[in-house]
Image (spheres, coloured by chain):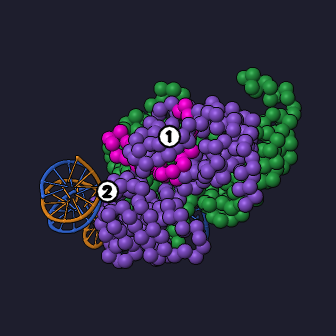
Chain colours: A green, B purple, C blue, D orange
DNA sequence: CGCGGATTTGAATAGTATCAATACAGGTGG
DNA sequence: CCACCTGTATTGATACTATTCAAATCCGCG
């Protein structure tokens, strides 16, 4: 609440930033109102529809972005076309390979996505002024590293059933806003990924993903309507199946 | 060369640091001679024999270290004991979860390892003084993230044969010092990991690893003596099998 | 030389992929 | 508003890869 009041009374905060999630938990949380206005001069909000490519592998990076809404998938492809999803980014995650000249992954909008773009130079010069900003980015990269390593365990050592459960658990805890409330045992959400994307994330085929979903449904661990909408009545029961 | 001269003439550089690889390519490359002596007051070199645990999962982190010699493996374990190697660290890599209070992985000496330990507080206070140091750490974390994501592709989408080839290729390019010479087509090295470790790295069983090694041997892609010593006569031919 | 752990090899099995057919959902035009 | 159409998802039958269990061999070491 005091937070809210401050916003209202401090007209220094750029209008576009006022309701922005990234300002609190994202990158911009490291900035004071002055820096925020400075940076906001260079930012550009944009909507990207599901499936559109945001950054190509080995493409030169000229700008960064914060995910404001939706889910971005990071993928890598082998020469023969086999694909692996190597990361999912939710609001208010930061998008882009910091300090690198080219991206090592493809970034694609998995759902409709809103991004807040900022030119590489603008962010990097602000980073020079404000070490807290680089520190914030470091925290994000460390979190991504932890997530990548967690997922390596899933990819290398879990069965198909455990993989699918782990995926649903991951999405449930990231997508259902009500989940933060302590003691909440159930979750409801729309899957941001197609079966093909899920398969590429889990290192499985779409048929195997589908079969495991069917099994979870018949075991009453999940309810699915319209292929995308999922209800998990008891998250603990789902977690038990994650291996 | 001028680099070398500076060392000889500048007696400020601590004796223990003079021949240290980490001073050039590792973390300490961000430090000037004064900072180096300051930090060296707190460092402690130690040898750890193969198999010894360096940091436990969820153990509180009180010190960091640079790998001076040998290979460290980072692992994660599921409740039922299934294990996954989530990273390998070679000299002069940095070891330890920066800014985290506890480690999220187990670190174990895969071979005999020399570490240069430094207390968490000493490094972190120096990081406050010198943003270049944090920047250097950021680079290392970013590299680890890239490696983790590359490995996710291997774990999720490659066949057993491709996994084993990829592993051998990784080790060859990291372990054979002669490999840096351009145009070098062959490599020779000792495997720093047992078959069990390799299996845990690749998400396979030891039997499958063994069978694939046998196949590579009978296809004349590698020569193996004493189970550990490997010669790759033509690296390109190995690379072709990495998928 | 013989012991014990590590590695290789073999045979049977289980789990996942592949190929093929059917069912379903969402959008389009009549 | 409904029938159609297209892409997505499910279900089924079979093939294949990697695992499992078991045995033999190799290697370092006392």
Q: Secondary structure at mark 2?
A: loop
User: Does residue B84 show up magenta in the picture?
Assistant: yes
Task: Work out which quarter of the rendered image holds the N terminus of chain A and state it.
Answer: top right
Residue shown at 80% from the left, 44% from the top = A128
| Residue that label 1 marks | B46
- Residue B220 in sight here: yes
Residue shown at 75% from the left, 35% from the top = B129
Structural crowding at the residue carrying mark 2, measured as other residues with C-alpha within 10 Å and reported as few (<14), some (14–19) or many (≥20): some
Tell which of A168 and B54 is nearer to you: B54
Q: Earlier in the sequence, mark 1 or mark 2?
A: 1
Q: Is residue A41 above or below residue D8?
A: above
Instruction: Give the image location of residue B183, x and y in percent.
Output: 58, 76
Residue B243 placement, left or right of A41? left
Instruction: Give the image location of residue A229, x and y in percent.
Output: 49, 47
| Residue that label 2 marks | B205
The image quadrant of residue C15 is bottom left
Q: Secondary structure at mark 1?
A: strand
Tell which of B55 and B114 is nearer to you: B114
User: Does residue B101 show up magenta in the picture?
Assistant: no
């Amino acid at each position: 609440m005091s937070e809210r009041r401050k916003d209202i009374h401090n007209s220094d905060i750029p209008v576009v930033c006022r309701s922005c999630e990234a300002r609190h938990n994202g990158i911009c949380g490291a900035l004071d109102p002055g820096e925020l206005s400075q940076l906001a001069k260079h930012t550009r909000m944009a909507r990207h529809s599901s499936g559109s490519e945001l950054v190509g592998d080995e493409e030169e990076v000229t700008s960064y972005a914060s995910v404001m809404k939706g889910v971005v998938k990071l993928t890598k492809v082998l020469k023969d076309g086999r694909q692996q999803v190597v990361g999912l980014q939710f609001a208010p995650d930061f998008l882009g390979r910091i300090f690198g000249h080219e991206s090592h992954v493809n970034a694609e909008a998995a759902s409709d996505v809103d991004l807040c773009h900022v030119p590489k130079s603008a962010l990097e010069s602000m980073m020079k002024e404000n070490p807290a900003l680089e520190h914030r980015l470091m925290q994000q990269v460390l979190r991504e590293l932890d997530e990548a390593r967690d997922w390596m365990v899933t990819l290398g050592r879990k069965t198909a059933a455990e993989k699918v459960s782990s995926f649903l658990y991951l999405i449930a805890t990231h997508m259902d806003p009500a989940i933060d409330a302590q003691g909440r045992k159930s979750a409801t959400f729309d899957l941001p990924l197609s079966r093909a994307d899920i398969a590429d994330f889990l290192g499985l085929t779409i048929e195997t993903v589908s079969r495991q979903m069917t099994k979870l449904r018949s075991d009453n661990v999940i309810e699915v309507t319209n292929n995308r909408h999922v209800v998990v009545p008891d998250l603990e029961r789902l977690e038990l199946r994650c291996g």
